[in-house]
Image (cartoon, coloured by chain):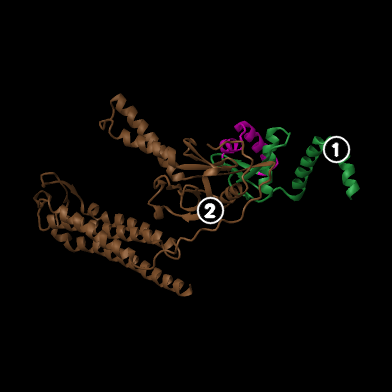
Amino acid sequence: MNAQATREHAYRRRFLLLLGGWTVLVSVALVVVPLVFRNRLPDPLAGHWGPSGRPDGTMSFAAFMFVVPVWLLIAMCCLGMAVRDRPLPRRATRTRLTTVLAWAAAFLLGTQALTIGANLDKGHWTQASPLSWQVIPMLAGAIAVGALGWLVGRLGPGDPPDTEPPTGPLIHVDPGKRPVWLSTVSAPWAIGLTFVAFASALSLAVATLLGWSTWGWSPVAPLALAFLVGLLLSAVSVRVDPGGLTVSYGLLRWPSRRVPLARIGRAWVDRRYPSDIGGWGYRGLPGSATIMIRGGECLVVRYTSGGELAISIDDAATGAALLNALIAHPPPSKERVS
Amino acid sequence: MLLTLDLNDPRPLHEQVTTAIRRAIVEGRVHPGDRLPPARDLAAALGVNANTVLRSLRDLRDEGLLEFRRGRGVSVLRRPDAREDLKARVRELLDEAARYGYRRDDVIQLIEELA
Protein backbone atom coordinates (compact mmCIF):
# COMPACT_ATOMS: atom_id res chain seq x y z
CA MET A 1 0.00 0.00 0.00
CA ASN A 2 2.77 2.36 1.04
CA ALA A 3 5.00 1.32 -1.85
CA GLN A 4 2.02 1.92 -4.13
CA ALA A 5 1.58 5.43 -2.73
CA THR A 6 5.30 6.19 -3.18
CA ARG A 7 5.16 4.94 -6.75
CA GLU A 8 2.09 7.04 -7.50
CA HIS A 9 3.80 10.05 -5.97
CA ALA A 10 6.92 9.56 -8.06
CA TYR A 11 4.84 9.06 -11.18
CA ARG A 12 2.82 12.17 -10.41
CA ARG A 13 6.02 14.19 -10.31
CA ARG A 14 7.26 12.77 -13.59
CA PHE A 15 3.87 13.26 -15.23
CA LEU A 16 3.63 16.91 -14.16
CA LEU A 17 7.26 17.51 -15.18
CA LEU A 18 6.53 16.01 -18.59
CA LEU A 19 3.47 18.23 -19.13
CA GLY A 20 5.28 21.31 -17.87
CA GLY A 21 8.40 20.60 -19.96
CA TRP A 22 6.30 20.00 -23.07
CA THR A 23 4.41 23.26 -22.50
CA VAL A 24 7.66 25.24 -22.16
CA LEU A 25 9.29 23.52 -25.13
CA VAL A 26 6.35 24.14 -27.45
CA SER A 27 5.95 27.74 -26.24
CA VAL A 28 9.63 28.44 -26.94
CA ALA A 29 9.34 26.89 -30.41
CA LEU A 30 6.19 28.91 -31.16
CA VAL A 31 7.96 32.14 -30.16
CA VAL A 32 11.48 31.56 -31.47
CA VAL A 33 10.79 30.09 -34.93
CA PRO A 34 8.82 33.10 -36.29
CA LEU A 35 11.29 35.55 -34.72
CA VAL A 36 14.22 33.80 -36.41
CA PHE A 37 12.53 34.12 -39.82
CA ARG A 38 10.99 37.52 -39.20
CA ASN A 39 13.39 39.40 -41.53
CA ARG A 40 12.65 37.02 -44.38
CA LEU A 41 8.85 37.33 -44.11
CA PRO A 42 6.65 39.97 -45.78
CA ASP A 43 4.54 42.16 -43.48
CA PRO A 44 1.61 41.63 -43.59
CA LEU A 45 1.90 37.91 -44.29
CA ALA A 46 -0.47 35.80 -46.30
CA GLY A 47 -2.68 34.31 -43.62
CA HIS A 48 -5.47 32.65 -45.50
CA TRP A 49 -5.63 30.58 -48.67
CA GLY A 50 -8.72 30.22 -50.83
CA PRO A 51 -10.11 27.00 -52.28
CA SER A 52 -7.95 27.51 -55.39
CA GLY A 53 -4.84 27.38 -53.21
CA ARG A 54 -4.00 31.05 -53.81
CA PRO A 55 -3.49 33.33 -50.80
CA ASP A 56 -6.55 35.56 -50.32
CA GLY A 57 -6.17 37.04 -46.82
CA THR A 58 -3.49 38.69 -44.71
CA MET A 59 -2.48 39.14 -41.12
CA SER A 60 0.13 41.24 -39.39
CA PHE A 61 3.12 39.65 -37.70
CA ALA A 62 1.59 40.43 -34.30
CA ALA A 63 -1.62 38.60 -35.24
CA PHE A 64 0.53 35.70 -36.44
CA MET A 65 2.01 35.47 -32.94
CA PHE A 66 -1.48 35.08 -31.49
CA VAL A 67 -0.97 31.29 -31.52
CA VAL A 68 1.25 31.70 -28.46
CA PRO A 69 -1.49 32.87 -26.03
CA VAL A 70 -3.86 30.31 -27.60
CA TRP A 71 -1.35 27.57 -26.85
CA LEU A 72 -0.69 28.89 -23.35
CA LEU A 73 -4.42 28.93 -22.59
CA ILE A 74 -4.85 25.31 -23.71
CA ALA A 75 -1.73 24.22 -21.84
CA MET A 76 -2.70 26.04 -18.63
CA CYS A 77 -6.16 24.44 -18.63
CA CYS A 78 -4.61 20.99 -19.06
CA LEU A 79 -1.94 21.62 -16.43
CA GLY A 80 -4.54 22.95 -14.01
CA MET A 81 -6.59 19.76 -14.36
CA ALA A 82 -3.49 17.60 -13.94
CA VAL A 83 -2.37 19.42 -10.79
CA ARG A 84 -5.82 19.45 -9.21
CA ASP A 85 -6.46 15.70 -9.20
CA ARG A 86 -4.73 13.97 -6.30
CA PRO A 87 -2.84 11.79 -5.98
CA LEU A 88 -3.05 11.24 -9.72
CA PRO A 89 -5.65 11.93 -12.39
CA ARG A 90 -7.46 8.82 -13.56
CA ARG A 91 -5.97 7.10 -16.55
CA ALA A 92 -8.83 8.27 -18.80
CA THR A 93 -8.19 11.88 -17.73
CA ARG A 94 -4.43 11.54 -18.18
CA THR A 95 -4.76 10.19 -21.71
CA ARG A 96 -7.20 12.97 -22.58
CA LEU A 97 -4.80 15.63 -21.30
CA THR A 98 -1.73 14.23 -23.07
CA THR A 99 -3.71 13.71 -26.30
CA VAL A 100 -4.99 17.29 -26.30
CA LEU A 101 -1.56 18.74 -25.47
CA ALA A 102 0.22 16.67 -28.12
CA TRP A 103 -2.36 17.27 -30.84
CA ALA A 104 -2.72 21.00 -30.13
CA ALA A 105 1.06 21.49 -30.16
CA ALA A 106 1.48 19.61 -33.43
CA PHE A 107 -1.46 21.42 -35.02
CA LEU A 108 -0.26 24.90 -33.98
CA LEU A 109 3.37 24.24 -34.87
CA GLY A 110 2.28 22.69 -38.19
CA THR A 111 0.08 25.66 -39.07
CA GLN A 112 2.91 28.01 -38.15
CA ALA A 113 5.45 26.04 -40.20
CA LEU A 114 3.17 25.96 -43.28
CA THR A 115 2.50 29.69 -43.05
CA ILE A 116 6.20 30.55 -42.65
CA GLY A 117 7.16 28.15 -45.44
CA ALA A 118 4.67 29.69 -47.85
CA ASN A 119 5.68 33.28 -47.00
CA LEU A 120 9.45 32.75 -46.72
CA ASP A 121 11.57 35.10 -48.87
CA LYS A 122 8.49 36.49 -50.65
CA GLY A 123 8.51 40.25 -51.18
CA HIS A 124 4.73 40.62 -50.86
CA TRP A 125 1.99 38.45 -49.42
CA THR A 126 0.30 38.03 -52.81
CA GLN A 127 3.41 36.18 -54.01
CA ALA A 128 3.13 33.58 -51.21
CA SER A 129 3.27 29.96 -52.37
CA PRO A 130 -0.07 28.26 -52.90
CA LEU A 131 -1.23 25.93 -50.16
CA SER A 132 -3.71 23.13 -50.70
CA TRP A 133 -2.69 19.48 -50.35
CA GLN A 134 0.04 20.41 -47.84
CA VAL A 135 -2.66 20.85 -45.23
CA ILE A 136 -3.58 17.17 -45.35
CA PRO A 137 -0.19 15.74 -44.25
CA MET A 138 -0.05 18.48 -41.61
CA LEU A 139 -3.43 17.42 -40.18
CA ALA A 140 -2.46 13.75 -40.44
CA GLY A 141 0.79 14.52 -38.63
CA ALA A 142 -1.09 16.34 -35.87
CA ILE A 143 -3.38 13.33 -35.44
CA ALA A 144 -0.37 11.01 -35.33
CA VAL A 145 1.30 13.14 -32.65
CA GLY A 146 -2.01 13.18 -30.76
CA ALA A 147 -2.05 9.37 -30.90
CA LEU A 148 1.50 9.34 -29.50
CA GLY A 149 0.29 11.58 -26.69
CA TRP A 150 -2.53 9.12 -26.06
CA LEU A 151 0.03 6.30 -25.74
CA VAL A 152 2.15 8.36 -23.33
CA GLY A 153 -0.91 9.08 -21.19
CA ARG A 154 -1.65 5.37 -20.88
CA LEU A 155 1.70 4.73 -19.19
CA GLY A 156 1.99 4.70 -15.45
CA PRO A 157 -0.07 3.19 -12.68
CA GLY A 158 -3.62 2.14 -13.46
CA ASP A 159 -6.67 3.36 -11.61
CA PRO A 160 -7.33 2.06 -8.12
CA PRO A 161 -9.82 -0.80 -8.37
CA ASP A 162 -13.43 0.27 -8.19
CA THR A 163 -14.33 -0.81 -4.70
CA GLU A 164 -17.96 -0.88 -3.72
CA PRO A 165 -18.28 2.59 -2.26
CA PRO A 166 -19.29 2.72 1.40
CA THR A 167 -22.92 3.50 1.98
CA GLY A 168 -22.33 5.87 4.88
CA PRO A 169 -24.53 6.32 7.91
CA LEU A 170 -28.28 6.08 7.60
CA ILE A 171 -30.73 8.72 8.70
CA HIS A 172 -33.30 7.70 11.25
CA VAL A 173 -36.72 7.84 9.63
CA ASP A 174 -39.58 8.42 12.03
CA PRO A 175 -42.73 6.58 10.85
CA GLY A 176 -45.04 9.51 11.64
CA LYS A 177 -42.92 11.99 9.71
CA ARG A 178 -42.25 12.74 6.12
CA PRO A 179 -38.58 13.43 5.47
CA VAL A 180 -37.58 15.36 2.37
CA TRP A 181 -34.07 16.11 1.20
CA LEU A 182 -33.68 18.90 -1.27
CA SER A 183 -30.65 20.34 -2.95
CA THR A 184 -30.04 22.54 -5.93
CA VAL A 185 -26.93 23.51 -7.81
CA SER A 186 -26.40 25.91 -10.66
CA ALA A 187 -23.48 27.07 -12.77
CA PRO A 188 -23.53 30.89 -12.78
CA TRP A 189 -21.26 31.08 -15.84
CA ALA A 190 -23.63 28.78 -17.76
CA ILE A 191 -26.62 30.87 -16.71
CA GLY A 192 -24.75 33.96 -17.89
CA LEU A 193 -23.99 32.38 -21.27
CA THR A 194 -27.60 31.27 -21.55
CA PHE A 195 -28.86 34.81 -21.16
CA VAL A 196 -26.19 36.15 -23.52
CA ALA A 197 -27.30 33.58 -26.11
CA PHE A 198 -30.93 34.55 -25.57
CA ALA A 199 -30.24 38.25 -25.91
CA SER A 200 -28.10 37.74 -29.03
CA ALA A 201 -30.63 35.42 -30.67
CA LEU A 202 -33.47 37.81 -29.95
CA SER A 203 -31.66 40.92 -31.18
CA LEU A 204 -30.44 39.14 -34.31
CA ALA A 205 -33.92 37.79 -35.00
CA VAL A 206 -35.46 41.24 -34.60
CA ALA A 207 -32.72 42.81 -36.73
CA THR A 208 -33.30 40.21 -39.44
CA LEU A 209 -37.06 40.73 -39.35
CA LEU A 210 -36.60 44.47 -39.73
CA GLY A 211 -34.04 43.97 -42.46
CA TRP A 212 -31.19 45.61 -40.56
CA SER A 213 -28.97 42.54 -40.44
CA THR A 214 -27.05 41.22 -43.41
CA TRP A 215 -26.32 37.86 -41.76
CA GLY A 216 -29.83 36.47 -42.21
CA TRP A 217 -31.28 33.72 -40.10
CA SER A 218 -28.29 31.38 -40.08
CA PRO A 219 -26.67 32.68 -36.84
CA VAL A 220 -30.02 32.82 -35.02
CA ALA A 221 -30.57 29.06 -34.97
CA PRO A 222 -27.34 28.05 -33.16
CA LEU A 223 -27.81 30.88 -30.65
CA ALA A 224 -31.38 29.80 -29.97
CA LEU A 225 -30.16 26.22 -29.57
CA ALA A 226 -27.45 27.38 -27.13
CA PHE A 227 -30.16 29.20 -25.19
CA LEU A 228 -32.34 26.07 -24.98
CA VAL A 229 -29.42 23.85 -23.94
CA GLY A 230 -28.38 26.40 -21.31
CA LEU A 231 -31.94 26.61 -20.03
CA LEU A 232 -31.98 22.84 -19.53
CA LEU A 233 -28.46 22.19 -18.25
CA SER A 234 -27.23 25.21 -16.31
CA ALA A 235 -28.94 24.11 -13.10
CA VAL A 236 -30.42 21.04 -11.50
CA SER A 237 -32.62 20.41 -8.49
CA VAL A 238 -32.73 17.04 -6.75
CA ARG A 239 -35.30 15.84 -4.25
CA VAL A 240 -35.42 12.65 -2.17
CA ASP A 241 -38.65 11.82 -0.42
CA PRO A 242 -40.42 8.59 0.58
CA GLY A 243 -41.64 8.26 -3.00
CA GLY A 244 -38.15 8.16 -4.46
CA LEU A 245 -35.79 10.47 -6.28
CA THR A 246 -36.84 13.41 -8.42
CA VAL A 247 -34.42 15.22 -10.69
CA SER A 248 -35.61 18.50 -12.18
CA TYR A 249 -33.52 19.99 -14.95
CA GLY A 250 -32.67 23.53 -15.71
CA LEU A 251 -33.78 26.95 -14.64
CA LEU A 252 -37.43 26.12 -15.31
CA ARG A 253 -37.19 22.85 -13.33
CA TRP A 254 -38.60 21.22 -16.40
CA PRO A 255 -38.47 18.51 -17.54
CA SER A 256 -38.54 16.60 -14.31
CA ARG A 257 -37.72 12.96 -13.90
CA ARG A 258 -38.95 10.74 -11.10
CA VAL A 259 -37.30 7.45 -10.11
CA PRO A 260 -39.50 5.41 -7.76
CA LEU A 261 -37.82 4.16 -4.57
CA ALA A 262 -38.40 0.53 -5.61
CA ARG A 263 -36.17 1.03 -8.64
CA ILE A 264 -33.20 2.26 -6.60
CA GLY A 265 -30.68 -0.22 -5.23
CA ARG A 266 -28.36 2.05 -3.28
CA ALA A 267 -26.84 5.50 -3.24
CA TRP A 268 -23.44 6.94 -2.38
CA VAL A 269 -21.22 9.96 -2.81
CA ASP A 270 -18.40 10.28 -5.32
CA ARG A 271 -16.17 13.12 -6.45
CA ARG A 272 -16.29 13.63 -10.19
CA TYR A 273 -15.02 16.38 -12.45
CA PRO A 274 -15.92 17.51 -15.98
CA SER A 275 -12.42 16.41 -17.05
CA ASP A 276 -13.22 12.83 -15.94
CA ILE A 277 -16.36 12.49 -17.98
CA GLY A 278 -15.73 14.73 -20.96
CA GLY A 279 -17.35 18.02 -20.04
CA TRP A 280 -20.41 19.65 -18.57
CA GLY A 281 -24.09 18.91 -19.04
CA TYR A 282 -25.76 15.55 -19.52
CA ARG A 283 -22.92 13.11 -20.14
CA GLY A 284 -23.14 9.47 -21.12
CA LEU A 285 -26.12 7.38 -22.05
CA PRO A 286 -29.16 6.59 -19.92
CA GLY A 287 -27.97 3.75 -17.68
CA SER A 288 -24.58 5.28 -16.96
CA ALA A 289 -25.18 9.00 -17.16
CA THR A 290 -23.76 11.92 -15.22
CA ILE A 291 -25.49 15.26 -14.91
CA MET A 292 -22.48 17.54 -14.50
CA ILE A 293 -23.23 21.10 -13.49
CA ARG A 294 -19.97 21.66 -11.60
CA GLY A 295 -17.05 19.47 -10.57
CA GLY A 296 -16.85 17.90 -7.13
CA GLU A 297 -19.34 16.15 -4.92
CA CYS A 298 -21.83 13.95 -6.80
CA LEU A 299 -24.77 11.85 -5.67
CA VAL A 300 -24.56 8.47 -7.38
CA VAL A 301 -27.58 6.20 -7.54
CA ARG A 302 -27.51 2.60 -8.70
CA TYR A 303 -30.75 1.23 -10.10
CA THR A 304 -31.91 -2.26 -9.22
CA SER A 305 -31.68 -2.90 -12.97
CA GLY A 306 -27.92 -2.25 -12.79
CA GLY A 307 -27.70 1.20 -14.34
CA GLU A 308 -26.24 4.25 -12.62
CA LEU A 309 -27.05 7.92 -12.48
CA ALA A 310 -24.70 10.54 -11.03
CA ILE A 311 -25.69 14.13 -10.33
CA SER A 312 -23.29 16.85 -9.25
CA ILE A 313 -25.01 18.31 -6.22
CA ASP A 314 -24.19 19.86 -2.84
CA ASP A 315 -24.81 18.00 0.43
CA ALA A 316 -24.92 14.70 -1.51
CA ALA A 317 -24.00 12.70 1.62
CA THR A 318 -27.30 13.59 3.31
CA GLY A 319 -29.26 12.72 0.17
CA ALA A 320 -27.50 9.36 -0.11
CA ALA A 321 -28.05 8.64 3.59
CA LEU A 322 -31.77 9.40 3.33
CA LEU A 323 -32.17 7.32 0.17
CA ASN A 324 -30.39 4.36 1.76
CA ALA A 325 -32.46 4.72 4.92
CA LEU A 326 -35.68 4.79 2.92
CA ILE A 327 -34.54 1.75 0.92
CA ALA A 328 -33.66 -0.12 4.13
CA HIS A 329 -36.97 0.76 5.82
CA PRO A 330 -39.45 1.55 3.07
CA PRO A 331 -42.30 3.65 4.38
CA PRO A 332 -45.83 2.29 4.06
CA SER A 333 -46.16 3.72 0.59
CA LYS A 334 -49.31 5.36 -0.65
CA GLU A 335 -47.81 5.48 -4.10
CA ARG A 336 -48.23 2.25 -6.00
CA VAL A 337 -45.23 1.18 -8.01
CA SER A 338 -46.28 -0.23 -11.31
CA MET B 1 -31.13 20.31 3.05
CA LEU B 2 -33.09 17.71 5.00
CA LEU B 3 -36.54 18.73 6.20
CA THR B 4 -39.05 16.70 8.17
CA LEU B 5 -42.76 17.36 8.24
CA ASP B 6 -44.92 15.85 10.95
CA LEU B 7 -47.80 14.09 9.21
CA ASN B 8 -50.13 14.42 12.22
CA ASP B 9 -49.43 18.05 12.98
CA PRO B 10 -52.75 19.94 13.09
CA ARG B 11 -51.16 23.41 13.02
CA PRO B 12 -51.45 25.69 10.00
CA LEU B 13 -49.16 24.65 7.18
CA HIS B 14 -46.95 27.73 7.27
CA GLU B 15 -46.18 27.11 10.95
CA GLN B 16 -45.26 23.52 10.18
CA VAL B 17 -42.97 24.66 7.42
CA THR B 18 -41.42 27.27 9.72
CA THR B 19 -40.82 24.59 12.35
CA ALA B 20 -39.26 22.24 9.80
CA ILE B 21 -36.85 24.87 8.49
CA ARG B 22 -36.00 26.10 12.00
CA ARG B 23 -35.30 22.53 13.10
CA ALA B 24 -32.99 22.05 10.12
CA ILE B 25 -31.05 25.14 11.23
CA VAL B 26 -31.00 24.10 14.92
CA GLU B 27 -29.81 20.59 14.12
CA GLY B 28 -26.99 21.95 11.98
CA ARG B 29 -28.26 20.50 8.70
CA VAL B 30 -27.73 23.94 7.21
CA HIS B 31 -25.08 26.26 8.54
CA PRO B 32 -24.87 30.04 8.81
CA GLY B 33 -23.90 31.34 5.36
CA ASP B 34 -25.52 28.43 3.51
CA ARG B 35 -28.08 29.28 0.91
CA LEU B 36 -31.52 27.73 1.17
CA PRO B 37 -33.02 26.10 -1.90
CA PRO B 38 -35.32 28.45 -3.86
CA ALA B 39 -38.79 28.80 -2.34
CA ARG B 40 -40.49 27.16 -5.30
CA ASP B 41 -38.28 24.06 -4.87
CA LEU B 42 -39.02 23.95 -1.15
CA ALA B 43 -42.72 24.27 -1.92
CA ALA B 44 -42.64 21.46 -4.47
CA ALA B 45 -40.68 19.23 -2.09
CA LEU B 46 -43.01 19.82 0.85
CA GLY B 47 -46.13 19.66 -1.28
CA VAL B 48 -47.32 23.14 -0.28
CA ASN B 49 -47.97 26.41 -2.05
CA ALA B 50 -44.98 28.65 -2.76
CA ASN B 51 -46.70 31.48 -0.86
CA THR B 52 -46.83 29.28 2.25
CA VAL B 53 -43.08 28.76 2.05
CA LEU B 54 -42.48 32.48 1.45
CA ARG B 55 -44.53 33.29 4.52
CA SER B 56 -42.43 30.89 6.62
CA LEU B 57 -39.22 32.32 5.22
CA ARG B 58 -40.39 35.85 6.10
CA ASP B 59 -41.28 34.71 9.63
CA LEU B 60 -37.81 33.21 10.05
CA ARG B 61 -36.24 36.37 8.66
CA ASP B 62 -38.17 38.39 11.25
CA GLU B 63 -36.79 36.02 13.90
CA GLY B 64 -33.35 36.96 12.61
CA LEU B 65 -32.43 33.47 11.45
CA LEU B 66 -32.54 34.08 7.71
CA GLU B 67 -31.29 36.81 5.47
CA PHE B 68 -32.86 37.81 2.14
CA ARG B 69 -30.40 39.11 -0.37
CA ARG B 70 -31.41 40.54 -3.69
CA GLY B 71 -30.36 38.23 -6.48
CA ARG B 72 -28.65 35.81 -4.13
CA GLY B 73 -31.66 34.15 -2.58
CA VAL B 74 -32.21 33.32 1.06
CA SER B 75 -29.34 32.31 3.29
CA VAL B 76 -28.97 31.28 6.91
CA LEU B 77 -27.82 34.17 9.06
CA ARG B 78 -27.28 32.45 12.40
CA ARG B 79 -28.44 29.62 14.56
CA PRO B 80 -31.13 30.34 17.11
CA ASP B 81 -29.64 30.68 20.58
CA ALA B 82 -30.58 28.28 23.37
CA ARG B 83 -33.47 30.38 24.63
CA GLU B 84 -35.07 30.79 21.20
CA ASP B 85 -34.59 27.10 20.51
CA LEU B 86 -36.23 26.15 23.82
CA LYS B 87 -39.02 28.64 23.27
CA ALA B 88 -39.84 27.13 19.89
CA ARG B 89 -39.87 23.68 21.38
CA VAL B 90 -42.06 24.76 24.29
CA ARG B 91 -44.46 26.20 21.75
CA GLU B 92 -44.50 22.84 19.98
CA LEU B 93 -45.09 21.18 23.37
CA LEU B 94 -48.04 23.48 24.07
CA ASP B 95 -49.51 22.67 20.64
CA GLU B 96 -49.07 18.97 21.28
CA ALA B 97 -50.66 19.34 24.71
CA ALA B 98 -53.63 21.15 23.16
CA ARG B 99 -54.14 18.16 20.90
CA TYR B 100 -54.63 15.99 24.01
CA GLY B 101 -56.95 18.55 25.53
CA TYR B 102 -54.44 20.04 27.98
CA ARG B 103 -54.27 23.79 28.37
CA ARG B 104 -51.35 26.07 29.14
CA ASP B 105 -51.92 25.95 32.90
CA ASP B 106 -52.06 22.16 32.83
CA VAL B 107 -48.67 22.08 31.17
CA ILE B 108 -47.23 24.53 33.71
CA GLN B 109 -48.55 22.30 36.46
CA LEU B 110 -46.96 19.27 34.82
CA ILE B 111 -43.62 21.06 34.67
CA GLU B 112 -43.89 22.06 38.31
CA GLU B 113 -44.64 18.46 39.24
CA LEU B 114 -41.43 17.41 37.51
CA ALA B 115 -39.29 20.09 39.09
Mark 2 Cα shell of 10 Å, populated few (<14), some (14-19), many (≥20): many
In terms of depth relative to the viewer, which is nearer, A38 or A131? A131
In-image side of A192 versus B56 (left or right)? left
Task: Tell me the amino acid under the disc marked 1.
Answer: Arg
Q: Residue at x 39, y 35 (%)?
A: A198
* Of the pair B90 and A25, the residue shown nearer to us: B90
Q: Secondary structure at mark 1?
A: helix
Please provide percent x and percent y for residue A281.
Answer: 41, 45
- In the image, the chain rendered in brown is A
Q: Classify B49 as above or below A263.
A: above
Q: Is residue B48 magenta?
A: yes
Q: Nearer the viewer, residue B53 or B3?
A: B3
Residue A260: in magenta span: no
The answer to whether residue A232 is seen in the rendering is: yes
Query: Which residue in the structure is indicated by mark 2?
Result: A268
Q: Which mark is residue B104?
A: 1
Eyeballing the image, is A333 above or below A310? above
- Residue at 32% across, 37% down: A222
Q: Chain of mark 2?
A: A
Q: Position of residue B49 (x, y in %)?
A: 61, 31
Residue range in magenta is B38-65
Q: Residues within 10 Å of mark 1 (few under 14, many from 20)?
A: few
Using the rendered view, name the quadrant where residue B91 is placed.
top right
Q: State left or right for residue B68 relative to residue A120.
A: right
Discs 2 and 1 share one subunit: no
Q: At 14% from the left edge and 44% from the top edge, which residue is drawn? A: A50
